[in-house]
Image (cartoon, helix red, strand yellow):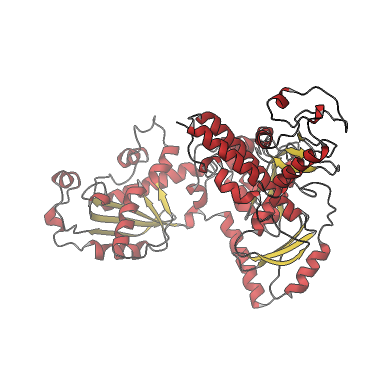
Amino acid sequence: MTSTATAAHRWEEQRSFEELGRPLHDVTFCVVDLETTGGSFADGDMITEIGAVKVRGGEVLGEFQTLVNPHTSIPAFIAVLTGITNRMVADAPSIRSALPAFLEFAAGSVLVAHNARFDVGFLRHFAREMDLAWPDFEVLDTVKLARHVVTRDEAPNHKLSSLARVFRASTTPNHRALEDARATVDVLHGLMERLGGLGVHTLEELQGYSARVATASRRKRHLADALPHAPGVYLFHDERERVLYVGTSRDLRRRVRSYFTASEKRSRMGQMVQLAASVTGIECATPLEAQVRELRLIAEHKPPYNRRSRHPEKVTWLKLTREPWPRLSLVKRVLDDDADYVGPFSSRASAESSLQALHEVFPIRQCNDRLARRPSRSPCVLAEMHRCLSPCDGSVDEQSYAAVVRQLQDTLLRRPDDVVDLVQARMAALAEEERFEEAARHRDRLADFIRGAARNQRLRALTGCPEVVAARREEDGRWAVHVVRHGRLAAAGTIPPGADALAWVEALRHTAETVLPQVGPTPAATAEETERILRWLESPGVRLVDVVGEWTCPVQGAARHVGLTVRSTLPRLDP
């Protein structure tokens, strides 16, 4: 084995040990307490004393204590509370001498304090004032832990003095830094002893402990043990092997373990974990491959605890029909009927809103049945209102109607300016008349149409390409390569160190999935999958290796209007 391979092997071993967690008996804790002239450094309060105790495995390794000259008068009530007087600190070192000495004492340990926000906040503040580099300390707060462990029946509150009595500390807190630090050590050990009975044996488990996490759920951490430290997809299963939830992560094992700690705040996930009996991991070559696999698995299994992406088939399309007298309609599927389709819209409401915006501009028929080439019917109300060309009674000839349809087709697929200009003019006129609610409805319809048209044009641009090969250097220094065919991810991988990049990419292309396109703007994948791929392709650092076909969007397309029509960016029309 080469030295590089040996180092890599040792690194993987070290990572696996780290994932098991650092046993509490092997962790060095530095328990610190401060006395100050007041409660806020922002108000100019200063440190008057620093006390700290370094412990590991229940044994005291050392103690640190120093008074600090605050170079300001100590308030009388503080002097009475702490017993620290102006005379006592007159010859004491300043914070500029005391703080570096404390940081040297605490180096390499986990900082512990009772109300750590106060003590660590003061220390960090003065480190910043002194341009002193603050070490990357991990911090543990005994107050936060005690709130999950000590009940109101045991103590009226979670003050240090109350907890010292609960855990029978050998030192009584007296508002002097070293004595309070010693009492906090006993409180820390008492908390760890209790939590040990609940299966908390590592620093990571102690940091993530919360009473909100059921003991039964916490004991399921072993479900993550077989998962790799790699990007991929994870599936939670119940006792009947039904998929409960599908997720993705850059680090499968670490992410799944987080479901059994306080870092997981979602109540639905807590319910899911209680039902989980096993977890399956699917390792992926790249994070993008993991995201795409997640979408496909959610669509396949429809897990009850996934809220999004479960029904990619439930979309609505806006269709311009191909018949003697074309019309617009809303449909659920794209057919091979040579019609023009726009979408998909994520909701029928937004599709209907877009349809209304188009009908305001283009007076094509809105009836749903097919018309003969030479119809003979009575005109409808829309015709009488001059909102329909009325081919049903011969009011318009085929050529004139077809010209309007061609203009509509151009608006749908290439340039929506006609709709934008007319609707914005109507909005302005309505606003001038103080008909703000009507103007807002026009605005919202226009926004829905522009978003749908822009989405359709972006999707068509990529799905029309038989193949796109792209690469990007990832955070670990390796090149991630993706082969995309008709908007579907066909292959993914990372170039191994030392490999011939061109030959490796060519081999990936040869082993990629064969993709036979169907019809419509999304012929080979769901719109959501293609959009995920588009976001990656448009991300910084991506290099196009090869493009088969033309990957282009209309210069005058709908995308340039999105910023003007999204609801949140439009001028306020309400009075």
Which of these two is toward me, 130 or 502?
A: 502
| Residue at 80% from the left image edge and 59% from the top image edge | 466
Note whether residue 242 is visible. Answer: no
Q: Residue furthest bottom?
A: 2
Which of these two is toward me, 395 or 251?
A: 395
* Residue 57 place in picture, x, y as percent: 44, 55
The answer to whether 362 appears left or right of 476 in the picture is: right
The answer to whether 72 appears left or right of 390 in the picture is: left
| Residue at 67% from the left image edge and 55% from the top image edge | 534
| Image quarter in which the N terminus is found | bottom right
Above or below for 266 versus 509: above
Q: Residue furthest left?
A: 87
* Residue 270 place in picture, x, y as percent: 59, 37
* Residue 190 place in picture, x, y as percent: 41, 44
* Residue 91 place in picture, x, y as percent: 14, 62
Above or below for 312 versus 10: above
| Residue at 77% from the left image edge and 39% from the top image edge | 319
Note whether residue 196 is visible. Answer: yes
The answer to whether 304 appears left or right of 196 in the picture is: right
Above or below for 530 versus 380: below
Q: Quadrant of residue 403?
A: top right
Which of these two is toward me, 471 or 459?
A: 459
| Image quarter in which the C terminus is found | top left
